[in-house]
Amino acid sequence: MDKKKVTLEEAKKAGGKKYREKVQKVLAEYEQLPDEEKHQSHLYYGYGKGKTTAAMGLAFRALGAGMSVAIVEFDKGHDQAKEHYFERRIFFKLKELGYPVELHSSGCERMNEDGTFRFKNAEEDFEEAKRALGIVRDLILNGKQNVLVLDEFVAAANYHLIEEKDVLDILDLYDKNRRFELVMTGHKLFDGLEEKVDLITENRKVKHYFDKGIQARKGIEY
């Protein structure tokens, strides 16, 4: 490793002529693409922590860049008295301040009064998932957003609130209406999904403090 100290101006010139020409060619080719080919689909999946965090972080970045954002949350409803996902408060505040963000939450309350989680799906959960699908379709066809985040969209199929075919159909609809970036989260892949998504990142648990009894904490996990 070369430890010779160089000035900032010298460092800017490093890398070689061929490298610079290659990068400039890639940048120029991207700019020539039609708009529908510039927009890409993302999926953050797995059983590790950080999928929604990544998706919401991308949404905040887009807003900071002057872009408009629409978010549809699957199976993340609440009873209006208790908030379990505090990032929503920030989005609501940003909207009040004039930032172009819209948030659509769906789902029924999952937390029981004794602090345990309700895993069993009720009829109302299916109805809420169906309602969210309708919102997604409308946003793809008619929305003005630059970025569309579908939080727990693939997870809704993983846990049978919607069909896997619903996810694939939405991706087909997006492919015909690529006016914006599409970001999704979920837990696991299923047949046909990988081929339809442009970027897939797996969040894999290597170690988690939950296993030693540390529960989900306000402001950290929710």
Image: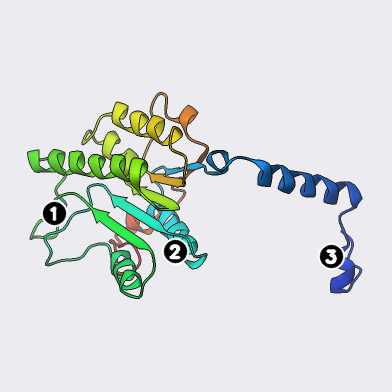
Tag of residue 30: none
Q: Is residue 146 visible?
A: yes
Res. 191 image quadrant: top left
CB atoms of marks 1 and 2 within 8 Å: no
- Mark 1 — residue? 109
Distance between mark 1 and mark 2 Cα atoms: 26 Å
- Camera-side mark, 1 or 2: 2
Q: Which residue is mark 2?
A: 60
- Residue 197 % position (x, y): 48, 35
Regarding mark 2 in the picture, which secondary structure is present there? helix
Query: In the rendering, which numbered label is found on residue 12?
Result: 3
Q: How many neighbours does mark 2 have within 10 angstroms: few (below 14), some (14-19), or many (20 or more)?
A: some
Q: Residue at x 30, y 39 (%)?
A: 137
Check the image and report above or below for 206 versus 79: above
Pick whichever of labels 2 and 3 is earlier in the sequence.
3
Residue at 52% from the left image edge and 44% from the top image edge: 39
Of the numbered discs 3 and 1, the one sitting upstream in the chain is: 3
Q: Amino acid at mark 3?
A: Lys
Left or right of residue 17, residue 47 in this image:
left
Residue situated in front as seen by the camera: 28 or 22: 28
Which one is nearer the viewer's eye here, 40 or 178?
A: 178
**Residue 188 locus on image (x, y percent):** 38, 36
Q: For this view, does 66 lie left or right of residue 120?
A: right
Q: Left or right of 117: which side holds 145?
A: right
**Amino acid type shown at disc 1:** Glu
Q: Position of residue 37 (x, y in %)?
A: 56, 38
In whole angstroms, how far apart are the C-alphas of marks 3 and 1? 54 Å
Asked which secondary structure carries label 1, the reply is loop
Q: CA distance from mark 2 to mark 3?
A: 30 Å
Q: Which class describes the residues within 10 Å of circle 3: few (<14), some (14-19), or many (20+)?
A: few
51 relative to 102, above or below? above
